Amino acid sequence: MVEQFFPGGQLDLSRQHSLPTPIMLLSGPPSCGKTSLLFQFAYNAAIDERGSNSVVFICNRRKLDTKPPFLSQGIDPSSGTFQRIQMKYVDDDEGVKKYFAAFHMYDAFPSAVIIDDFGDFFNQRSCQERYENPRGRDLAMVRILALCHNAVMHANEKGHCKLLLSDTHHGDSPRLLFIYKRWVSAIFTIKGDGQGSFLLRRNSNLASENSERSRSAKYSVALQFLYLERIFEDDESKT
């Protein structure tokens, strides 16, 4: 499934539909190209749904303008495919909440909703004050993840819709994994290889994971491009 983050990666909607919850998480350290991977994912989804604005990309506009994503080599920035990616800018968790609270009112649902830096929308102090609880941020995240889950499951009753979140971690595991793992069916983690490249692999510790052999991707971000170096079976990394 790591192929869906790179050029030519086909999104198997029927397979996504069969997951317990069609919600995925992409987690990695700072400056590892997460937003670039999300844009490639959105581009692939938009190609699969040619002819309609079928992908919604939610992010903070100021952060996106400061650190714009890099496209993969061979992707034309003027391609009409980008016209089918709807950008939605929000500043905090309330913006995310409002979008999904109205999700059931749509006549047609997007095939994919992507939220960049999901965890950063939850301000620690404002969440604590709102819930009058020192763990207010955790509570806010749980409530909005539940809202997202219900909205996406409702959309999947009528078609195919998936949700991809990204978050930043500074250790070996996604931060707040204990919260995310209840709501997501697949977690993709990124780790530096110590030589300037990154390894993207699917986490196999979720109860919803199947036993099929997984693959990893080695990529780099250089010269303002997202560059896929190779995709390999996970067994290869042990040899």
Image: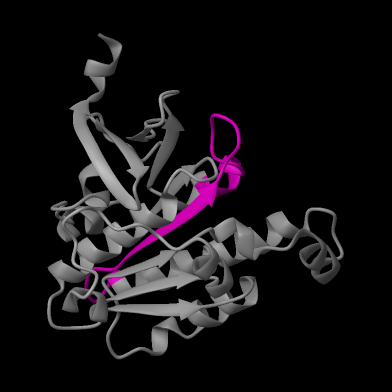
Q: How many marks?
A: 0
Magenta stretch containing residue 170, yes or no? yes
Q: Would residue 201 be visible to someone looking at this image? A: yes
Q: Quadrant of the C terminus?
A: top left
Q: Quadrant of the N terminus?
A: top left
Q: Residue furthest top?
A: 239
Q: Give the extent of the magenta segment.
A: 156-180
Q: Where does residue 80 sit, x and y in percent of width and height?
A: 17, 79
Q: Is residue 22 left or right of residue 190?
A: left
Residue placed most toward the observer, 11 or 170: 170
Which residue is located at x 73 percent, y 63 percent? 123
Q: Where does residue 3 sit, x and y in percent of width and height?
A: 21, 45
Task: Tell me where residue 187 sits by quadrant.
Answer: top left
Q: Is residue 142 left or right of residue 187?
A: right
Q: Is residue 44 left or right of residue 152?
A: left
Which residue is located at x 62 percent, y 65 percent? 121
Which residue is located at x 42 percent, y 82 percent? 103
Q: Up-down: is 17 above or below 48?
A: above
Residue placed most toward the observer, 123 or 156: 123
Magenta stretch containing residue 102, yes or no? no
Which residue is located at x 42 percent, y 56 percent? 35
Q: Where does residue 213 sit, x and y in percent of width and height?
A: 20, 27
Q: Would residue 20 be visible to someone looking at this image? A: no
Q: Where does residue 134 sit, x and y in percent of width and height?
A: 85, 54
Q: How is the image coloured?
A: one colour
Residue placed most toward the observer, 162 or 8: 8
Task: Tell me where residue 48 sits by quadrant.
Answer: bottom left
